[in-house]
Image (spheres, grey):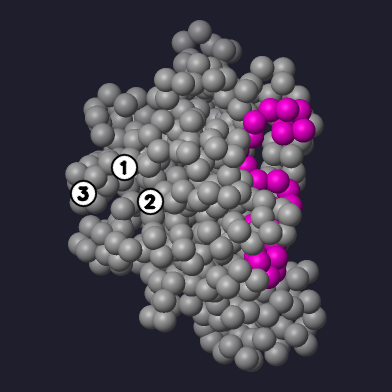
Amino acid sequence: MKVLVIGGGAREHALCRSLSLDSEVTSLHCAPGNAGIAEVAELHAVDALDGPAVAGLAASLGAEFVIVGPEAPLVAGVADAVRARGIDCFGPSREAAALEGSKAFAKEVMAAAGVPTGRSYVCTTPDEVDKALDAFGAPYVVKDDGLAAGKGVVVTDDLATARAHALSCERTVIEEYLDGPEVSLFAVTDGETVIPLQPAQDFKRALDGDQGPNTGGMGAYSPLPWADPKLVDEVERTVLQPTVDELRRRGTPFSGLLYAGLAITSRGVRVIEFNARFGDPETQVVLARLKNPLAGLLRAAATGQLAAFPPLHWSEGAAVTVVIASHNYPGNPRTGDPITGLADVAEKDEHAYVLHAGTKLERRSDSAAAEDRVVSAGGRVLSVTATGSDLAKARERAYRAVGRITLDGSHYRGDIAAEAAEGKA
Ligand code: AMP
């Protein structure tokens, strides 16, 4: 199978790594990719938001299967453009991706499907905002209705901050505060059949102890030793299947990856958000544990064949990923800093590997003595992933590998999976 992956973060590196280990995949391409993905796939330049350009690239490569990683191309209709060229594509249509692209739409679908979620108001005027904030009280949860690259949500005790964020959004969803640990559960679906993957937990805040601003995600682990073993079945029954059924009933079937962000509250499981694609950084740990070859599973979803798909197999062990971020991230990150130690990890750490996010290869052909080097090119730079018989072992290996890497001004959290390794949520 000739496969093209769209995107260029650590999620796409994790996807490409798994695809490169799949014997069914004979040729692997990625656009635009990054310096790490270049080691397992052939890179191509493309505007990932331009559907006809992506479809044209896939056709010119003779790709039989396209996998769209990030949300923005899906919300822009890139999967539709690829399918219109007669090429199989993993990822929902533009209309179905609105489940992520509009929080108000997601709330409407959940209400229609009877899916448990926080009570909320959709507001467009200052008056509506004030009424909603008053109705719920602190802590306030204020969400931009549209896509905001993980930065559209403000959770705060401060009314003025909550109000200012709400008024800065064209349309905002103000929601009741949901207490309790969070779980990310992914499911692969063809629009009818739902196959849940293993749950993971990610760390959204920039600093240890869940302090500091929200980020795209600073680390993740799987499995969740503290979670109820029946959680996956329950979420499949009460959240995933009803949502997929409701979207099909509306004539906008959702095929691809349905990501449920959940809060395990004292009153039961509640959906915090849906995403329409693999989560980053949870994908890094979920795929590290998946034993089935990836291409066949995703292609079966893209072609409506999941009902006949055999059960998934998972490693009994654990996986942990730690994100190394640039100076100043999640503010405007500094880029162009050289990264060292990557070869050291590849050489010395049998159970750890580095997935690249914002990196690029800097060619230094100007001088014969100078070698090409990998430099930072974004906010989240690397996702250092390790496996082990349990979380404690996987963590130890991940942090040992992190310690071999240098990137001037970078930062990472030191407490990824620390409490879970001790059995706490
Ligand atoms: P989202 O972009 O919807 O994932 O929100 C980002 C983060 O904000 C989530 O991972 C939660 O930590 C937090 N959050 C979102 N909605 C709520 C809520 N209703 N109650 C408490 N925290 C929330």
User: Residue 260: within the magenta?
Assistant: no
Residue drawn at 51 percent across, 8 percent down: 368
Inspect the image, locate mark 3, and give the three-letter code of the amino acid beneath it: Asp
Q: Circle 2 is placed at which residue position?
A: 198
Assign a secondary structure to mark 3: loop
Question: Which residue range is magenta in the image?
Answer: 82-109
User: Residue 91: within the magenta?
Assistant: yes
Q: Circle 1 is placed at which residue position?
A: 314
Q: Position of residue 82 (x, y in %)?
A: 72, 32
Q: Circle 3 is placed at which residue position?
A: 390
Q: From the viewer's perspective, is 408 left or right of 86?
A: left
| The quadrant where residue 61 appears | top right
Q: Main secondary structure of the magenta part?
A: helix
Q: Earlier in the sequence, mark 2 or mark 3?
A: 2
Quadrant location, the C terminus: bottom left
Count of numbered badges drawn on the protein: 3
Q: Position of residue 125 (x, y in %)?
A: 80, 81
Inspect the image, locate mark 1, and give the three-letter code of the amino acid beneath it: Trp
Q: Is residue 184 visible?
A: yes
Nearer the viewer's eye, disc 1 or disc 3?
1
Q: Earlier in the sequence, mark 1 or mark 3?
A: 1
Alpha carbons under labels 2 and 3: distance apart: 15 Å
Quadrant location, the N terminus: top right
Instruction: Please report contact status of discs 2 and 3: CB closer than 8 Å, yes or no.
Output: no
Inspect the image, locate mark 2, and give the three-letter code of the amino acid beneath it: Gln
Residue nearest the viewer, comparing 273 with 220: 273
Q: Is residue 5 above or below residue 94?
A: above
Q: Position of residue 284 (x, y in %)?
A: 42, 43
